Image (cartoon, rainbow, N blue to C red):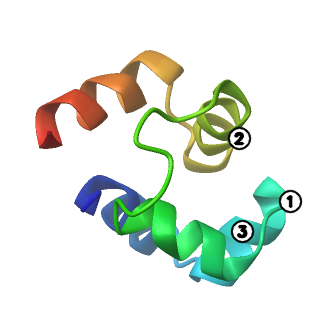
Amino acid sequence: MRGYLKRERKKLGLTQREVADKLGISQNYYCDIENGNRQNEMRSNILTGLSKIFNLSVNEIIEMENYEK
């Protein structure tokens, strides 16, 4: 589970669908990423997209990712 993604999304008042649309993926696929069921090693395009959406550096996301593992 990637609780940090949910926390960051909620801080901005975004739905999973809104984040998915910004990433150019389906809501179901994003839900699977957020729940840790997909992208065990996140692809760079997902990392950079999340970085822009959540206004975090890629390094911050990687640190949160590593912390929750």
Q: Residue at x 42, y 16 (%)?
A: 59
Q: Residue at x 77, y 55 (%)?
A: 23
The residue that disc 3 covers is: 20
Q: Residues within 10 Å of mark 3 (few under 14, many from 20)?
A: some
Q: Are marks 1 and 2 in contact (CB under 8 Å)?
A: yes
Q: Residue at x 52, y 35 (%)?
A: 42
Whole-angstrom CA distance, mark 1 to mark 2, is 9 Å
Q: Residue at x 73, y 32 (%)?
A: 45
Kind of residue at badge 1: Gly
**Which image quarter: residue 37?**
bottom left
- Along the horizontal axis of the image, is 1 left or right of 18? left
- Measuring from the top left, give residue 65's x and y in whole percent: 29, 36
**Which image quarter: residue 15?**
bottom right
Q: Residues within 10 Å of mark 1 (few under 14, many from 20)?
A: few
Q: Find residue 24 and name its label.
A: 1
Question: Mark 1 vs mark 2: which is more N-terminal?
Answer: 1
Residue sitting nearer the eye, 22 or 37? 37
- Along the horizontal axis of the image, is 29 left or right of 54? right
Whole-angstrom CA distance, mark 3 to mark 1, is 6 Å
Q: Is residue 29 above or below residue 47?
A: below
Kind of residue at badge 2: Gly
- Measuring from the top left, give residue 51's x and y in whole percent: 59, 35
